[in-house]
Image (tube, rainbow, N blue to C red):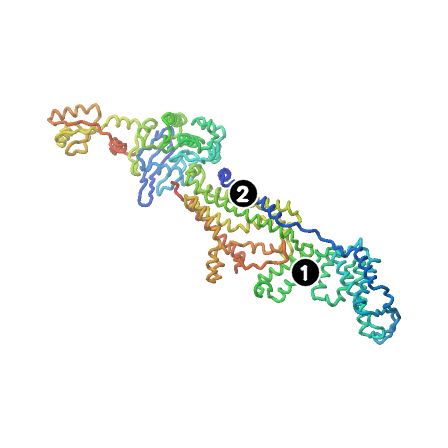
Amino acid sequence: MSDKEPALRIQHITKTYGKKTAVSDVSFDVFPGEVFGFLGPNGAGKTTIIKSVMGFIRPDEGTVIINGYNTKKDYEKAMATIGGIVENPEMYTNMSAFQNLKMYAKLHDNVSEERIYEVLDLVGLRERAKDPVKKYSLGMKQRIGLAQAMLHKPKLLILDEPTNGLDPAGIHQLRDILKKYAHEDGAAVMVSSHLLSEMQMMCDRIAIINHGKLIQICSLDDLTNQASAASIYRIKTSDPKKSAEILANTFEYTINNINETSFDIEVDEANINSCVRTLVDNGSDILGVQKVETSLEDAFLQITGGGIDVE
Amino acid sequence: MNKILALYSNEMLKISKRLSVWIVSILMLVIAVLCPIAFSRTESSFSDEHYDESYSKEAFTKRRDSLSQQLGDTSSFVQHSTVQYSFNGKSVELFSTYLDADEETVELYSSLTIYNTLLSSYDFDKYPIFKTWLSMHALLNYDKAHDELCVLNSVPFNERDEEWFKAFNTTSQLLEYASSALFNHNYQAYYESEKINIENYRDFYLPMIEKIISIDPQGELSVEETGKLEQLFNKIYTYQDELEYGLLSEGERPRIVTSAKREELQDTIAILNYKFEHLQTYQAENDLAHSVNSITIMLGRYCLIIILILIAGSSIAQEMATGSIKSLIIAPVRRWKIFLAKLLSIITWFIAGSVLLVGISTLVTLAIFGSHALPNYLFVSGGTIQSIPYFLYMILHFFVDSLPLFVYLMIAFMISCLTKNTGVAVGVSIGMVLSVNLPSLIISMFGEKNWIDLLPSSNMTITKRVFPFADLMYSDDLMISESFEITSHTLQFSLIYVAILIFILFMIAYDAFTKKDIQ
């Protein structure tokens, strides 16, 4: 993948609002032909980065290069190759979807009227294209937003939380559209979300961001391997300190949160049994073994452990 | 450039989709159509020039008959004789008349003689007496000269001395000219008669007659029209006086003529002379037509102000508030192009609305009053009189008069760029329109006139300085205005002042919009 020129290259982006740092020194590349996931909890800085790319805000530092064009020097050329939705798709609600698309098309070179119908067909809104947008449901607005984003066949498509308001069938359809656009049409697609499950189903690579910092970039395969490999179990024993020591001496699993009643151990499902057996063999009284439900943020921090370097 | 055009056409489309804009626009057009109609209904129609029946041949015949009945046989007091007079030391023999009667009888006899002469020799069909000013005034002079002559003839033969002879000679001469003026409808003879008529020998009267003859050599103008020319000439004369003595007589107290005012006076005189020569005298109907049109445009302008402030105030703020600005930001266009397109679309509505308002109002006025009621604007350039056609003048006048409106638009646009709040942008701008003269009023209460001149409101109203001769289109006077518009600054100062003001507003708006982070 790295032999291709990146569709999006972000270098050392930093943006502060007053004292609060929204994004701190973030760099990454997105390549043609991949669906790139941008994962993080709400307020992590995903939207700020996307807005910096799309020209909504000016980063304090850093450069954004889109399909070879630096946004500071060749703004219009750079923006001509990018399409997207930021937060919610907002249209002129007293106009029809078709009029909205036509107005947008005029701002691009070489977008024909047939292309407008083509994208309307793609998102399944051709029948309702002449209705004013204010009569649309949130899901329909999402679809028309997608149609607008793809109207000029951008080489880089950026969608911020695109599944908001879509029903399960709509989400499924969206996934298919985005995968096809990246894998068959060779475009770069970047999708942000705070849901891992969503990311898993469509992304080839995922960047994880939290508190304005890039935590990790990994391929989906790495992520699923790690996710399935490592689960956290909370083991309650009469003497957690001693029990943890026994396990640490026996295995190489990561052990955390040792307190007076329990400790956490990171171990895959297949090996938990041998852990328990070892404890029993060494005379620990096991009061309970529980698989820990973690928040998304915790889960990712647990999964990645900050161990893999950002490329 | 293509991008700006595309953005611009999108902006126009967006504005055209707004219901509020259409409602107020339609209201404006309704005002433009209905106002002139309503105003013209309230005014009574103008009566045609009336023809005084008492100057007809029939009326003269009636009066002659009753007079001749009253006087009976005139031969009882009229005596003719050839008398010797001594004049300049020479002796002259003259056929003379003596009227041996009292003053009243002499007067009646004079009238009877006049009626008889008129009825036998005057061509009533060709020159109806009350129809033209010349006939009327020639008759007056003829009547006066004849009466004087009869009074002279009532002096007995033996009392007629050299003094009498002189008077008789002069009066005969006057009668001769007056008679030629009356019967031959000859202006030049009238002029000669006025030359002798000492009583009318006011210092401006003869030049005036001379001037009237130059534009009406055949004496075809009516009493009314020539009367207006007299008024006009009177005005020119007054202005020339003011120019000569350097003092303005109008207003509350006399004021010294400044060099700027001197120039204005010279131009005014030139324009009034032009109007005189082209018979563009005061017409009440024209005055009404123009007033109706002006009031209609003024009312319509309020609608236009609301439309434009709605558009300007919401153009960016509303898109920010609803988030639709995003589809513009995502598009491959630089922010300044978006800014420019929005500004251009506002200016386009401003121009289109103005032309539409002035156009329709003027057309309706034209339909009601007729095209003659709408004269050209006259001004002096390089020593010659130039004219601007009425419609073009009204449009130009509207734009110049709307300079404050343009400033308010820029303010609304600026606030629109600074805030997400359409309400604030629209509210503040309309508040400014309503309170434009408030600062001047407050300051004028404390009597600091110098400050007022530096306020924006004093420098935004430049109409009077751009079109100083607007009043002359309908009246013979330049109204002396004591309003805020009279500042001590020149037009150039105000124009530069307003240009800087607009530029500052523009830069604040531009900077705010192009550098703003869109959240």
Q: Position of residue A17 (x, y in %)?
A: 33, 44
The residue drawn where x is 49% and y is 61% is B449
Q: Nearer the viewer, residue A21 or B119?
A: B119
Residue B74 horizontal side relative to residue A187, left or right: right
In what quadrant of the picture does the C terminus of chain A appear?
Answer: top left
The residue drawn where x is 33% and y is 43% is A16
Query: Is any part of residue A190 visible from this angle?
Result: no
- SS category of the residue bearing label 2: helix
Residue B444 horizontal side relative to residue B228, left or right: left
Residue A201 horizontal side relative to residue B177, left or right: left
Q: How many marks?
A: 2
State whether residue B111 is above or below residue A183: below
Query: Is any part of residue B97 visible from this angle?
Result: yes
- SS category of the residue bearing label 1: helix
State whether residue B474 is above or below residue B334: below
Of all chains, the one bearing label 2 is: B
Q: Which mark is residue B27?
A: 2
The residue drawn where x is 64% and y is 60% is B269
Residue wearing tag 1:
B233
Mark toward the start of the polypeptide (1 vs 2):
2
The residue drawn where x is 11% and y is 26% is A282
- Quadrant in which residue A139 is drawn: top left
Of all chains, the one bearing label 1 is: B
How packed mark 1 is, by other alpha carbons closer than 10 Å (few <14, some 14-19, many 20 or more), is many
Q: Position of residue B63 (x, y in %)?
A: 80, 59
Give the Cα separation between the discs numbered 1 and 2.
Answer: 45 Å
Residue B113 horizontal side relative to residue A267, left or right: right
Q: Amino acid at mark 1?
A: Phe
In what quadrant of the picture does the N terminus of chain A appear?
Answer: top left
